[in-house]
Each structure stands twice: as structure tokens, then as C-alpha cells.
Amino acid sequence: ATAPGRIYIFICLFILDRISLCQQAGVQWHDLGSLQPPRRGCKLHAHASLSFSLPALQPLVREPCRSCAVVSSSGQMLGSGLGAEIDGAECVFRMNQAPTMGFEADVGQRSTLRVISHTSVPLLLRNYSHYFQKARDTLYVVWGQGRHMDRVLGGRTYRTLLQLTRMYPGLQVYTFTERMMAYCDQIFQDETGKNRRQSGSFLSTGWFTMILALELCEEIVVYGMVSDSYCREKSHPSVPYHYFEKGRLDECQMYLAHEQAPRSAHRFITEKAVFSRWAKKRPIVFAHPSWRTE
């Protein structure tokens, strides 16, 4: 065969190999469901394209939660006294390395599901006994793009997660599929009219958590998340970016700096404007007062 012919054969074999790997992993070749909340008692078959557990590569399929508390990592949670109310929800969603120990009165202590950026995995490992030894009833969903999360090539973060499941048998760890990552990008473009990559935007963990909550929950209450207009008001109080990092970055300064950056930035305020539109059509309630004044 000619050189071009050999290249063509190699490409075909490579594609067939990738399809075979995906089939072994249980990938379902269909589109994800809509963002409408599921009906009571249904199985979330759309999750076959959403995430896979480690190391068994099983799709995330579970009954929907009747009520969900999505707990922001914002400094707005300090002094809220909402811990008991949050723990009263059937399912409690948390983000990245946000701790509960020492903050129970304000953020509660239960964690049903924790959504984690691949960049935050090392931060959880610093206190692995708190996150992985004691919280065995928590389901972890890790999102990320690029080589660090690559299953076939064994990306760095992917290998770390595999090692964790060996250290703690029974630990429930899932990762977003590439299809789900593309789905989240498409929602951003559909809602804002901007291509995420071309506009130099990074989606936040809050974005992925809200989309996951809409797939898993019948009713959602979001705690500590401010509205899109909040940081543009002169009268807003200064709070830390994270409730567990007192005296560090100011939340609104962080939000505005990212919003104004031309590239390589989160669009926190843009995302909150999208959440506001969603809340008018879906069972989402924002507990922070800034949403009630609009």
C-alpha cells in the first residue's frame, strides 16, 4: 500500500479502536435529556452520557432527589445560620474543597454529592481523611477538560482518582464524559450567544453543579449565591470569596475582575444571569436576599 493508503488504514483502525473502548465503557450514543427536572421515580437514563464511575466505568443512574440544597462556597454563608435547614434537604450538593467541619451552623454537615474541578482534586487530597475516609456516603463527580482527565491516555488527574478508589474501596467517584463537557459548553453558547472557547471563558464549578442539580433534583434551593446585579451595587458588604478563607480575596472584586478580563476567565456574573432566567421556568429558589429584590 502507498504511504497515504497506510495512513488511511491507520486512521480507520484508530477510530474503530476508540469506538470499541467507548462501547466497553458503556457509552450510550444518544443526546442528553433536557434540563427539565425529572419526574418522581424515573431513572435518569440521560446520565449514561453524563459520567462514569471509577474504576468500573458504570454510568451514573439513580432515582431523582425530591429536594436538593445546592450550597455555595461563598463568604455569604458566614453567619447565615442555615445549617439545619440545609441538612433538612434530601440531597445536599457541595463544591470543590468547601469543608463542613467548623462551619456546621452556617453550611450544615451532610454531603450527598460534591462536584469537583480537576484543579481542586489536589486540595481535597491535603485533607483526604475528612473528604474520603469520613464521608463515605458522599458521591463525588469530577469535571475537567484536556489531558489531565483523559481516560484512554491515563491523564494525571484520572490516575489520581483511580488510586483513590483503590485506597478507599467503595468510594463513589464519577467523572464527566467528554460528551457532557461539550453539552455544558453548548448550553453556555445557547444561553449567552457566545462560544465559550472563542470568548475566552472558563465555566465554573457552580455552572456544572447547577446543570447536574437540574438533572438530579425535582426541587432546588440554592444557598449563598448572589444575583447577577449584586456586585454592581455600591452598598453590598465585603465578604471573602470562600467562606472557609476568611480575610482573603473579596468575592465581588473576584467576580468583577473575571467578568472584565478579555480572556481566560470565569464568567460568574454571566452565569448568574443565566441562572436567573432558569429560575423563572424551573423549580429553583435562591435563598440569598439579592434575588428577591429584582
Image (cartoon, rainbow, N blue to C red):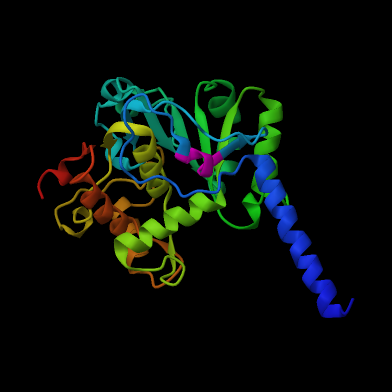
The secondary structure making up most of the magenta span is helix
Closer-to-camera residue (234/155):
155
Q: Percent position (x, y) of residue 270?
A: 29, 59
Placement of 70 over or under 2, stated as above or below: above
Q: Residue furthest front?
A: 1
The answer to which quarter of the image holds residue 68 is: top left
Q: Which region is colored magenta? A: 46-51
Q: Percent position (x, y) of residue 114?
A: 46, 34
Placement of 117 over or under 168, stated as above or below: below
- Identify which residue is drawn at 44% across, 69% down: 200
- Identify which residue is drawn at 25% across, 31% down: 79
From where the camera sits, is residue 127 visible? no
Is 47 a magenta residue? yes
Placement of 167 over or under 124, stated as above or below: above
Quadrant in which the N terminus appears: bottom right
From where the camera sits, is residue 19 visible? yes
Is 71 a magenta residue? no
Q: Residue furthest left?
A: 293
- Identify which residue is drawn at 67% across, 32% down: 56
Q: Percent position (x, y) of residue 273?
A: 24, 55
